[in-house]
Image (cartoon, grey):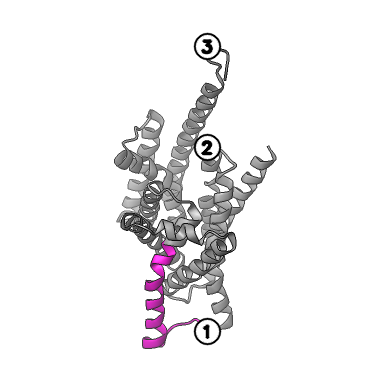
Amino acid sequence: MQEQRIGVLAMIGACSIWGLSPLYYKLLADVPPLEVLAHRTLWSMLFFAGVLLVQGRLGALRDALSTPRRIAAIGFAAIMISCNWFLFILSIQIERATEASLGYYIFPLVAVLLGVLFFRERLGRAQMVAVGLATIAVLILSVQLGHPPWVSLIISLTFGLYGVAKKRLSVGPVVSVTGEVLLLTPLALGWLWHLHGVRGTGLFGQDGGVSALLIVSGPLTALPLILFSFASQRVNLSSIGLIQYLNPTLQFLVATLVFREPFGTVQAVAFALIWTALAIYSTATLRAESARRKAAIVPDASGET
């Protein structure tokens, strides 16, 4: 019980960092998003590599990148997460943080559809209703905006495809992410060299505060993932799924209460539909988890459990 309680606290910590991260990226609003992404990639790689070095697990990273197939899988995951990071950073800078939070709200429902597409999973009745409500919400926003909410849709889709890639990998999350940012590091270094050495517009080193904030992007990326990995080993999946909603909820509150982004009646209706869909989806998931637990403790004919 103590282990599970600590795991829940770790999960809350991870989701709180993710959910409040828009406040951090808002401080970097004057730094072009590609430059922020390049630094996030570089400093994350150094931080993760340091963690693996301290743990004596650098060999696991070498094994993870030992075959072309694994490199391709980790490379695809790297592309998806870098696109996700870039769009999230951009959404904060262009005052679309509310749409970004919506993307992470609808991610579980997108993940359900990707499960059907890639793993031939079946949709239950509750899942179909939840996906239907989410679709209606997206259509409502599309009509109101005059176009689909691309920020939300691409954030949820890239994160969903990232999850598909991770599901096919047989390596731990820290090793996997280290491999991802390692593959992205040459691109990050190339872009930073272009900014500083060719164009002379790179902001790192020109201001101590901005430079420090850019360096912080490494541990800010790594810490919640480490907490999440710790929690996933101690907390059941249904609890993790519910606690994860803390992330987009905090993002939403930051966007509307701190950044004061517009939030009218149409957005309220769309978000209400999404929240209803998630309530239906989560309730069905909890019931399924409870049924599995009961089935696991039912004694067999010999009286053994």
Badge 3: how crowded within 10 Å, few (<14), some, or many (20+)?
A: few
Above or below: residue 233 compared with residue 204: above
**At x 51% / y 59%, what residue is drawn?**
255
Amino acid of disc 2: Ser
Q: Which residue is mark 2?
A: 238
**At x 41% / y 31%, what residue is drawn?**
126
Amino acid of disc 1: Gly
Determine if residue 98 is in view. Answer: no
Residue toward you, 82 or 68:
68
Q: Is residue 52 left or right of residue 264?
A: right
Determine if residue 42 is in view. Answer: yes
Residue toward you, 248 or 2:
2
Give coordinates of residue 161: x percent, y percent: 36, 51
Q: CA distance from mark 2 to mark 3?
A: 30 Å
Amino acid of disc 3: Ala
- Main SS of the magenta part reads helix
Q: Which residue is mark 3?
A: 301
**At x 39% / y 34%, what residue is drawn?**
127
Q: Inspect the magenta stretch and tell me whether residue 185 lies in it.
A: yes
Examine the image and state in which quarter residue 117 appears. top left
Q: Earlier in the sequence, mark 2 or mark 3?
A: 2
User: Which span of residues is magenta-colored?
Assistant: 180-204
Q: Earlier in the sequence, mark 1 or mark 3?
A: 1
Q: Earlier in the sequence, mark 2 or mark 1?
A: 1
